[in-house]
Image (cartoon, rainbow, N blue to C red):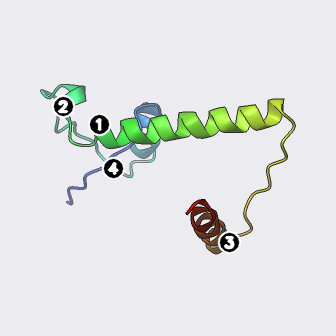
Amino acid sequence: MFLYKIVMAKDNEKAIMSILGDRKIAHLINMNQKEHVFKLPYVDLIRRCDESERKVNYLIDRCKVTNIQLTPAESPEELHQLTKDFAASKR
């Protein structure tokens, strides 16, 4: 038997636990049953991720409204290079 710590977004937790349980892959035990959700150690990280996602979605929507064409990067390396180039142009 092994004990793993799983951190997941609250929107997907029930679906993920259901899949793992139905396939008899894992038996899940809530180790934080007595803890308040907003006092758990990963809550701030999830909030920051949610806020970032909200901002990106807002920008995508604004680009659609103003007819700005978005082109995805071909690879993570290209995205990294574009990000570096953009940061350098701002200096």
Q: Which residue is mark 2?
A: 39
Per the model, the C-alpha gap separating discs 1 and 2 is 7 Å
Q: Amino acid at mark 4?
A: Ala
- The tag earlier along the polypeptide, 3 or 4, is 4
**Residue at 21% across, 42% down:** 41
Numbered circle sitting on residue 78: 3
Q: Which residue is mark 1?
A: 43
- The tag earlier along the polypeptide, 2 or 3, is 2
Callout 2: 10 Å neighbours few (<14), some, many (20+)?
few
Q: Look at the numbered disc 2 and give the secondary structure of its residue.
A: helix
Q: Is residue 88 left or right of residue 2?
A: right
Callout 3: 10 Å neighbours few (<14), some, many (20+)?
few
Q: Which residue is mark 4?
A: 26
Residue 58 visible, this angle: yes
Q: Look at the numbered disc 1 and give the secondary structure of its residue.
A: helix
Q: Amino acid at mark 2?
A: Lys
**Residue at 55% across, 33% down:** 54
